[in-house]
Amino acid sequence: MKNLCTMLLAAIALSVTSCGNNTTPDSGSANTAKAAPAGETIYKNNCSTCHMANGQGVPGSFPPLAKADYLANHEQAIKMVVKGSSSEITVNGDKYSNMMPPQQLSDDEVAAVLTYVYTNFGNTGAVITPDQVKEIRAKY
């Protein structure tokens, strides 16, 4: 029964995130002041269903983004948003195996949403640029 519930949650999350409202930030989205509002909107529309509005995730199902050790590797975080993953990951010592669908976001949008995540939820305050996203997208 637990496995069925997990699969149902994953299916719902996939349908919600794959049809999220793409809000394109201003062309200067690398600027934290401009990226923050756009990043917050993108997060609410594409990420909060699984990772929750406060970034705490759902224990056992969807990993937290709040104070997440997984985010220490910027390339890994960018790749996860751009390419998605069906592999098991470990975040803050807990294993998660639900699928993360690739997000249909532009480089500017990925940079804005990750900058929002990095500057909120008790994270490092890092700024991700569209150029970093473009480089990682091309690499994988």
Image (cartoon, helix red, strand yellow):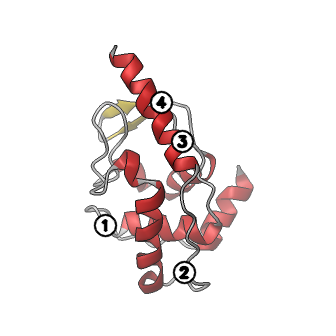
x 47%, y 37%: residue: 12
Question: Secondary structure under badge 3?
Answer: helix
Q: Which residue bears the numbered disc 3?
A: 15
| Quadrant of the image occupied by residue 53 | bottom left
Disc ID at residue 120: 1
Which of pointers 1 and 4 lies earlier in the amino acid sequence? 4
Real-space Cα separation, disc 4 to disc 2, in angstroms: 31 Å
Camera-side residue of 77 and 84: 84
x 44%, y 27%: residue: 8
Which of pointers 4 and 2 lies earlier in the amino acid sequence? 2
x 25%, y 62%: residue: 122
Q: Position of residue 24 (x, y in %)?
A: 59, 74
Real-space Cα separation, disc 1 to disc 4, in angstroms: 25 Å
Question: Secondary structure under badge 2?
Answer: loop
Q: Which residue bears the numbered disc 4?
A: 88
Real-space Cα separation, disc 3 to disc 4, in angstroms: 20 Å
Real-space Cα separation, disc 2 to disc 1, in angstroms: 17 Å
Q: Which residue bears the numbered disc 2?
A: 29
Which of pointers 2 and 1 lies earlier in the amino acid sequence? 2
Real-space Cα separation, disc 2 to disc 3, in angstroms: 27 Å
Of tags 3 and 1, the one toward the viewer is: 3
Q: At label 1, which amino acid type do we have?
A: Asn
Q: Are marks 1 and 4 in contact (CB under 8 Å)?
A: no
Disc ID at residue 45: none
Q: Position of residue 134 (x, y in %)?
A: 68, 65
How many other residues sit within 10 Å of disc 4, few (<14), some (14-19) or many (≥20)? Answer: few
| Quadrant of the image occupied by residue 72 | bottom left
Which of pointers 2 and 3 lies earlier in the amino acid sequence? 3
In this image, 109 relative to 63: left or right? right
Q: At label 2, which amino acid type do we have?
A: Ser
| Quadrant of the image occupied by residue 32 | bottom left
